[in-house]
C-alpha cells in the first residue's frame, strides 16, 4: 500500500534555507530592528521625559516650564522647519495641551495640576 511507503525512498522536502528567505527570518530581522531601536532611542526619550517631570516635582520649574519642555521634546524632530512655522506648531500644541480634555487629563495625571487655557486676546 502507498501508506507504508510514506517517507521511504522519496525525495526529502527542501529546507527553508534552500528555498530562499523564510517568513520567520524576516520576522526575526524585523524584531531585531525594533529591539535595536528601543535599545538606542527609547531610553533617551524616557530619560528626557523623566528629567522634565523630576525637575517639575522638585520645584526647579513650574507647570508652564514643564509644558514648554514637553512641547520642545515633541517638536525636536521639526527643527528643519522655518522658525515661523515651528513657532506656530509649538503654539498650537501648547494650546491643545491646555484645551483638549484628553491631553489636560494626561497633564493632570503626570503633574497633579491642570494647565490654564490660553487667554483670548
Image (tube, rainbow, N blue to C red):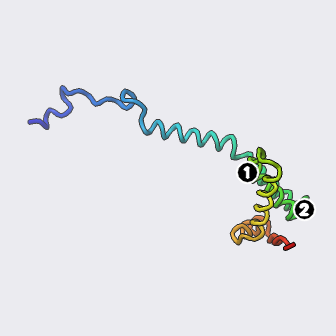
Q: Position of 73 compared to 34: left or right?
A: right
Which residue is at the front of the view, 35 or 68?
68
Q: Nearer the viewer, residue 72 or 1?
A: 72
* Residue 5 vs residue 41, the one in the foreground: 41
Residue 6 placement: quadrant: top left
> Against 86, is 6 above or below?
above
Q: Residues within 10 Å of mark 2 (few under 14, many from 20)?
A: few
- Which of pointers 1 and 2 lies earlier in the amino acid sequence? 1
- Left or right of 92 on screen, residue 16: left
Placement of the N terminus among the 4 image quadrants: top left
The location of residue 73, given as percent across then percent down, is 77, 52
Residue at the disc numbered 1: 46
Q: CA distance from mark 1 to mark 2?
A: 20 Å
Which residue in the structure is indicated by mark 2?
Answer: 59
- The kind of secondary structure element at disc 1 is helix
Measuring 89% from the left and 63% from the top, which residue is drawn there? Answer: 62
For image coordinates 77% across by 62% down, the residue present is 92
Q: Is residue 112 above or below residue 44?
A: below
In the rendered view of the protein, which quadrant contains the C terminus?
bottom right
Residue 89 location in percent, x, y?
A: 76, 57
**Label disc, if present, on residue 6 of the rendered structure:** none
Q: Residue at x 71, y 72 (%)?
A: 101
Could you say whether the residue bearing mark 2 is in a helix, strand or loop? loop
Quarter residue 15 falls in: top left
Amino acid at each position: 500500500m502507498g501508506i507504508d511507503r510514506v517517507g521511504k525512498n522519496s525525495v526529502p522536502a527542501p529546507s527553508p534555507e534552500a528555498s530562499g528567505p523564510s517568513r520567520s527570518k524576516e520576522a526575526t530581522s524585523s524584531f531585531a530592528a525594533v529591539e535595536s531601536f528601543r535599545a538606542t532611542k527609547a531610553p533617551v526619550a524616557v530619560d528626557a521625559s523623566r528629567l522634565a517631570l523630576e525637575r517639575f516635582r522638585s520645584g526647579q520649574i513650574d507647570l508652564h516650564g514643564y509644558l514648554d519642555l514637553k512641547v520642545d521634546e515633541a517638536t525636536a524632530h521639526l527643527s528643519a522647519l522655518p522658525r515661523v512655522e515651528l513657532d506656530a506648531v509649538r503654539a498650537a500644541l501648547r494650546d491643545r495641551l491646555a484645551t483638549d480634555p484628553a491631553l489636560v487629563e494626561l497633564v493632570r495625571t503626570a503633574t497633579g495640576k491642570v494647565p490654564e487655557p490660553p487667554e483670548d486676546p
